Image (cartoon, helix red, strand yellow):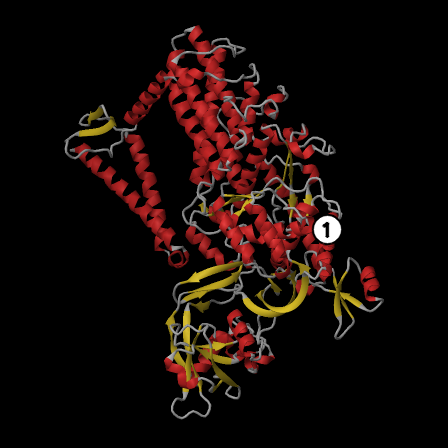
Amino acid sequence: MTFLRLLICQRNYLNTRSYLYTPSYFLNGSYDPVMIEKNWYKWWQENHLFLPKNTKDKFFRDNYVISILPPPNITGTLHLGHALTISIQDALIRWERMRGKDVMWIPGMDHAGIATQSVVERFLLKTQNLRRKDITRDAFINEIWKWKCLHTNHIFHQIASMGASLDWSKEFFTLDAPLSKVVMDCFIQLFNEGLIYRDIKMVNWSCTLETAISDIEIEHKVVPKPTEIIIREEPSVEFGVLHQVAYRLVNSFDIDEIVISTSRVETIPGDKAISVNPNDMRFLGLHGKYCHNPLNPDIIIPIIPDEMVDPNFGTGAIKIAPAHDPNDYKFSIRHKIPILSIFDTDGRMNALCQLPELQHLDRLKCRKYILSKLKDKGLYRGFQSYKTSIPLCSRSGDLIEYFLKPQWFVLYLKTKPLALNVYNNYKVGKLKINPSHYSSQWIKWLENIEDWCISRQLSWGHQIPAWYVGSNNGYWIAATSEENALKISGGKEVKQDLDVLDTWFSSALLPLSVFHWDGKNIPVEYPLNFIETGSDILFFWILRMALLCTHFTGKLPFNEIILHPLIRDSQGRKMSKSLGNVIDPLCIIKGDSKTLNDIAIDGNVLEQNKHDIKTINSGLSGIKAMGADSLRFALIDYTKHTRQINMDIANVSSAKHTCLKLWNATRFFLYQTKYYGLKTIDMNLRSTHIFDKYIVSRLKKAIDVCNMGFELRKLFEVTECLRKFIVYDLCGIYLEFIKQELKKNDNERAIYALSTLYSVLYIVVKLLHPISPFITEELYQYLLKFVPCSEINDDSLEREDVKNFRNIIRDMIGISDLRLNDINNDLTDMYSRVVNSELVLYLHTKDLFLDNSKQISRVKWLQKQEEAISNILKSEKYIQNAPIYIQEKNIKKLEDIQNELRLICNRQKGDKN
């Protein structure tokens, strides 16, 4: 096997360049990531190192790797979730270049219809006291374009600061004319094929934004018990309560009422039935009876048995408000009962509620009034605690309602063969999914896919190219312009739908639209080699991309899907601008003196979440500069957690320590070469010294692990391997050995040792480059002053003497790892450690010297941590909102801190005695 295999190949752009640029920071200084990373990105771009070769050759795809960076929204700043995506993709892209591939990695920005519109609406209200309805549609869209221009540069700066090696010559925006044309053409083709239709269906509805929204834009908040929650920045509303309300029976003599359970008394005016389980013996005599609406006795509603009712829920009887609950709506279809919507699109009560005093009031504000009225009528029968989950709009913080509205849908039922085609492509190996455990979810979605609502009642986005012909009893057509619509309608009056397309619709066409597909010839760049993104949008983006693009081209839009876990904050919560736990990656890269509270609250935070930020982040200070290399390393290392990532700045600091070790190792090498007067390295030298053979054997192992990690898309194995090699094998063992060797002033031994060290550093820099490109570029430029490194392929690396030496090293580490907590209670004043089967070390502790200054510093730090965590655990908001497993984790952390403080205190008492 070639020792350097893939990473050290002739086409690696690090190999083929000469020394073109003076490093940006002198290596005789300390490691300063901000200074090191300052100028390299500009230099990379100026030298066109991110551009692929000429793509006109019809066979160019054989040596090409093409991918798209999932376009970030223009809503403001990027967060650590984006940073994770960039880190993983750039590592893969740089690795492919180092394999000799030409790479086309395309950047872009997403218009993000609902997200951007909601942010700009809040911005205008805050800065100009303007609401969307106060200005014209065109004026509002113009304000969003201003917002886009204002924030795009900062987002691109963030991406560049992460070191993303993108081909900026192909940068796109999803509302650019060429991309919009592809989106419009695809809509029209699907419409003409009968695969897009318009119908009245129940959809998720945001009353604040007055639009349908997708499931991914809903956050479900668990409410375990009666809790007051602020909704829409209004006075708090109580959730987690199941109310019992009596409905008086009509013309009944033996039983005069039926008591139902409901958590939403505000929908009582819209009730059209009461339902019980047909097998519930308590209500057998009430089947087919009628009762009075408790708020309006003139309204008579039936009692209808249905299997959907859980007899163990509340009283066993429920009310049916068909216009305001998906299950109630299905019930109304089965039993053919009327549907009455008592809410306007903004969430206020309308005239159909038949209670004039409630009209034009927000439905949640009506809750207390209705409860009071029920009590006055003698119809309130109490309440019980009720664990529930309430759906909240992630963009506005409002409670999601379920509305019956005319919408546009993609008809998936007719495309079952298409879903089957995607399924079969996966089964025969044409599509890889990494990690593989997501495959079952992929198949499940394909087998159970439902029609997709693609219309949004917004101003910002692709206006749907559908035109209504005539006035009453007309029909819909699809056309790219009014002129074309008039031709299709035969000159009849036409009016374009004001709705816009769901952003996911245009996103699903990106593999075609970014290459300006003409609708006929498949772009030569299609399909993508891989698509990498968060696992949370596997359905919303990736699956829909596969279905639509395969429909138009007959080919899957990508050969491989690579997914990473969802990144969360240290409390286990999803990172969200509205939650206020989003941190700009630049705050970690360059440092920020502000507290985490200030960093978060500076963002686009919903008012009701600001208190939670202060509660959870209390006691946390600012962030020190860590550099992009450390952040990338830490984020990639986190992907070992397959389900979710709880982000902690301490892990970035650990990654920075790894970079520091490599920096200092290179400084040591350069100092020693200067001391011994070496200006070149003779790479034909092969050291036979056991120290040198040891480190080269460890390097060989590291190269194999790194290559396998990249090939299997397990990049966390790369970071884990490199951390161990750099910190322990190279710096902790090998350098400590040769430091003693070099002190002997033996020129011959020095030349062999430094030659080996150079080879190791030269290769390690390349191994680390895809993960941490800035520091490796810097160090590489210094190492280029010497001759290029050749391959190392020495069969003696696995000889018995090297293996024995590794065992000795392992035993020595075991001895050096002795800690005071290794006490053996059977041997007074003795500590013991089993080193191996032949050696047990006993250590007298009577005269053991302890470093008092370090002990004191440790105690102070532990006491601060104890106070901070204790304050968090006492907070009512934290107790109510933090997940149980997070609370348990913090309780365990506090116990560990207190135990360590107690142990140190006992030792100090023992020392005094």
Of 152 and 438, the residue lying toward us: 438
Instruction: Look at the image and tell me in which quarter the C terminus lies.
Output: top left
**Left or right of residue 395: residue 811:** left
Name the residue nearer the viewer: 397 or 445: 445
- Residue at x-position 44% and y-position 35%: 653
- Find residue 843 and report its image quarter: top left
| Amino acid bearing label 1 | Val
For the residue pair 880 and 352, the one nearer the viewer reads as 352
Q: Quadrant of residue 405?
A: bottom right
Q: Which residue is mark 1?
A: 182
Q: Which residue is pictured at 55% across the width and 35% down the height?
A: 91
**Can residue 97 be seen at all in this image of the molecule?**
yes
**Vertical placement of residue 779 versus 892, above or below:** above
Quarter occupied by residue 419: bottom right
**Residue 775 versus residue 212 in the image, above or below:** above
- Work out whether residue 581 can be spotted: no
Residue 754 position within the rendered picture, expressed as x and y whole percent measured from the top left: 46, 14
Residue 824 percent across, percent down from the top left = 18, 33
Image position, residue 36 (x, y; %): 55, 28
- Secondary structure, mark 1, is helix
Between 489 and 718, which is closer to the camera in this rendering?
489
Could you tell me residue 522's position as x and y percent? 72, 44
